[in-house]
Image (spheres, rainbow, N blue to C red):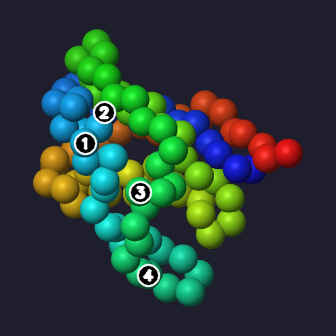
Amino acid sequence: IELAEYTVTFPDFTADTAKVCEILANPPQILKHSKSGDKLTDIGHMIKKVKVANENGSLVLYLTLTAFDSNYLNPEYVVAALNNAGLMMPEEYSIVRQKIIFKR
């Protein structure tokens, strides 16, 4: 698996989509958990594509993230990056993996 596409939905919450895109274009480091322990990680290179929309009263993130070996990026870390940037995202949200993309 090389990439994975996700939809992250924050129900009953809207935000400045331009600000969210700006943060995700250069996200703050996050504390990433691994088998070797926790470490501060730059996730910017792991976020391959972002679309942000306010749809039907909800904020929706359409994300394409790296999904191989040590470069696997759990979408939870994208939410953590938004929180670390001061957006105060709601605690309730859903993550749906839409597609996985294999490398040939």
**Residue in the image at 61% along x and 31% along y:** 98
The amino acid beneath tag 4 is Asp
Image quadrant for the C terminus? top right
Res. 23 in view: yes
Please name the residue that numbered disc 4 is placed on.
38
* Residue 38, placed above or below residue 104: below
Please name the residue that numbered disc 3 is placed on.
44
- The local secondary structure at tag 3 comes to helix
Q: Count how many numbered circles sit on residues in the image.
A: 4
> Quadrant of the rendered structure where residue 51 is?
top left
Q: In this view, does 96 lie to the left or right of 76?
A: right
Gap in angstroms between the C-alphas marked 2 and 3: 21 Å
Please name the residue that numbered disc 1 is placed on.
22
* Residue 30, placed above or below residue 81: below
Please name the residue that numbered disc 2 is placed on.
10
Gap in angstroms between the C-alphas marked 4 and 3: 18 Å
